[in-house]
Amino acid sequence: MAADITPGRIALVGSGEYLPVMHDIEAWLLEGRPRRYVQLATAAAPEGDAVLAKWHRLGAEAAARLDAEQVIVDVRTRAEADDDDHVEAIAGAGLVYLSGGSPRHLARTLRGTRVWEAILAAWRGGASLAGCSAGAMSLGGYVPEIRHPRKGGTDGLGVVPDLRVLPHFDKYSRFIPDTVMRPLISPDTVVVGIDEDTALMSEGPGEDGTWEFRSRGVGSAWRIEHDRRHRVNAPLRLRVDA
């Protein structure tokens, strides 16, 4: 990577992708970048054509509000994630956004493919990168199984390798006690719950090379530890694999 090029901004979103409530965050992600809004609804592929069409429609509405070009990269399988047309569509992105659905399907479909390499190249060249719900979970180093935390998850895409994300946290934490979430905690790993319509956002590395993530939105982000949870008020410093 050239010395004068730094990776773009990152947003990990608890819910609300493409909706008006998240407009300001998406505008921040596109700020100063090409008005080319690349959208992958890959995580929703197991839910069928109707659900994918809904995500594409919401993405079109968000792009219109942002005065940006919507670019749909309709990757549903690993074979499609190596397709030349999909790879080429990512070039020139100002923002690449991974929306919700199944985080396991998303991570397993993209990991190690040409489309994922193109996304990384765009981000490392200055485009912003965002994931919402399943997308946020997949950007960590490990995707936990939220409904059954004691069962094994799957490897994530590893952009924020030491992070495990629990989206929709204000909704699901009502039914999942802290003791059930303890199996997700491991040495050198940060577990964060992100409320709905809320994001953890960072615009780049600090002097020590870590990235400062700040919470913004309707709700809060929460650091989950063995015996407690606490609101993320100060910047959360995380290693990013740039």
Image (tube, rainbow, N blue to C red):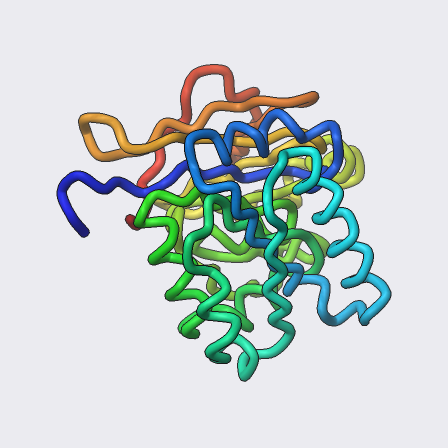
- Residue at left 50%, top 40%? 191
Image height check: is 31 above or below 127? above
- Residue at left 42%, top 59%? 91
Q: Is residue 30 left or right of residue 120?
A: right
For residue 185, say whether it is visible.
no
For residue 235, say whether it is visible.
yes
> Foreground: 134 or 29?
29
> Foreground: 64 or 220?
64
Q: Residue furthest bottom?
A: 79
Q: Give the image quarter of residue 21.
A: top right
Give the number of callouts.
Answer: 0
Q: Give the image quarter of residue 111.
A: bottom left
- Residue at left 69%, top 35%? 169
Image coords of residue 220 (percent x, y): 62, 23
Image height check: is 16 above or below 164? above
Image coords of residue 80 (percent x, y): 56, 79
Image coords of residue 9 (percent x, y): 41, 36
> Foreground: 152 or 21?
21
Q: Residue furthest right?
A: 50
- Residue at left 45%, top 68%? 88
Q: Is residue 20 left or right of residue 12?
A: right
Image height check: is 227 above or below 122? above
> Foreground: 99 or 89?
89
Image coords of residue 159 (percent x, y): 39, 51
Q: Residue furthest left?
A: 3
Q: Residue furthest top?
A: 233
